[in-house]
Amino acid sequence: MCLDTRSEAGECAMADDVVRIKVGVSMRAVHNSTQEDILEVPRSEWDAMTDKEREEYLDQAAQDHLANEVEAYAYVAEDEG
């Protein structure tokens, strides 16, 4: 069985060969607003990373998840007519 997870080499990862990383967003102003996803990284790639690379990967995953789940905007309210 193959997951929809691919290594940088394009190889399909097996369920036992991945590191599952949970990413989530929670907005304090909205009750029950948590959104989580699971990312799967091939174990061989994860094991090849240094601690610093893993930390950077997790930080980027969190930032990407936030950008995909939350929209922010700003405008001058006086322009609303």
Image (spheres, rainbow, N blue to C red):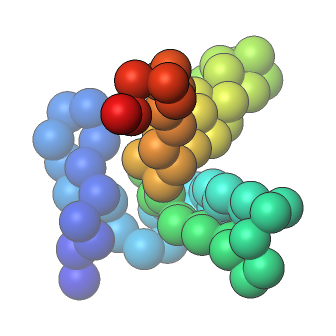
Residue 44 seen from this side: no
Q: Is residue 29 left or right of residue 6?
A: right
| Location of residue 25 (image quadrant) | bottom right
Residue displayed at 84% across by 61% down = 28
Give residue 46's position: percent from left, percent from top: 57, 39
State which quarter of the image contains the C terminus. Answer: top left
Residue displayed at 66% across by 21% down = 56
Q: In the rendered view, tell whether residue 80 sits above or below residue 39.
A: above
| Location of residue 3 (image quadrant) | bottom left
Front one among 68 and 53? 68
Q: In the rendered view, tell whether residue 15 sits above or below residue 75.
A: below
Residue 58 seen from this side: yes
Give residue 48's position: percent from left, percent from top: 57, 28
Q: In the rendered view, tell whether residue 5 sits above or below residue 52.
A: below
Residue displayed at 29% across by 58% down = 5
State which quarter of the image contains the N terminus. Answer: bottom left
Front one among 72 and 38? 72
Q: Return the residue found at the far left.
A: 10
Q: Return the residue found at the far right.
A: 28
Give residue 64's position: percent from left, percent from top: 49, 37
Give residue 79's position: percent from left, percent from top: 40, 23
Q: Is residue 4 left or right of residue 41?
A: left
Residue displayed at 75% across by 16% down = 52
**Number of on-image labels:** 0
Front one among 73 and 50? 73
| Location of residue 54 (image quadrant) | top right
